[in-house]
Image: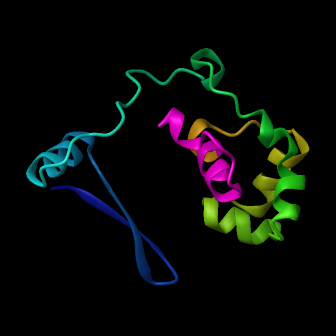
Amino acid sequence: MDIQIISRDGEPEYAVLQWAQYEALLKAAGLQQQAPMPSSSTPDAASGQDFRPLAHLRNLREAKGLAIEALSRTVGISPSYLGLIESGERQPDAAIRRSLAWELGIAGWREDM
């Protein structure tokens, strides 16, 4: 089994593995997959997913009392990239949008998974 371990502060935080291996683990554990993965990498706009609340990302972050460094570290991006997203100069990919939505408590973050 090929697993990539992602650590933070010297401690393992995430394990990344191939989808087929993940499905085999679910099957071995007697669990069902909860949501199907998209068959292609289509943009969220095409799938109808609405992440417009992220247009107010800076306001949401500040309302939660999160420093830009703290939120970016949690999401796994640099503070400068998060600043570009907040200013509208960059459009984050779906994974980053989901992470930001999750961290900021935006409803509907699971629906695109």
The residue at the far left in this view is: 28
How did the renderer colour the structure?
Answer: rainbow
The residue at the far top in this view is: 46
| Closer to us: 85 or 112 | 112
x, y percentage for residue 76?
60, 60
Q: Which image quadrant is residue 13 in? A: bottom left
Q: Is residue 112 magenta?
A: yes
- Residue at image point 85% right, 48% down: 86
6 up-or-down from 2: above or below = below
The residue at the far front in this view is: 107
- Residue at image point 60% right, 44% down: 98
User: Considering the image in quadrants, where does the N terminus appear?
Assistant: bottom left
Q: Is residue 9 magenta?
A: no
x, y percentage for residue 26?
18, 49
Q: With 23 as the anchor, is 100 left or right in this view?
A: right
Q: With 68 as the anchor, is 9 left or right in this view?
A: left
- Residue at image point 12% right, 50% down: 30
Q: Which image quadrant is residue 105 in? A: bottom right
Query: What secondary structure characterizes most of the magenta part?
Result: helix
x, y percentage for residue 40?
42, 21
Q: Which image quadrant is residue 24 in? A: top left
Q: How many marks?
A: 0
x, y percentage for residue 59?
90, 54
33 up-or-down from 47: above or below = below
Q: Which residues are magenta?
A: 97-113
- Residue at image point 77% right, 54% down: 82
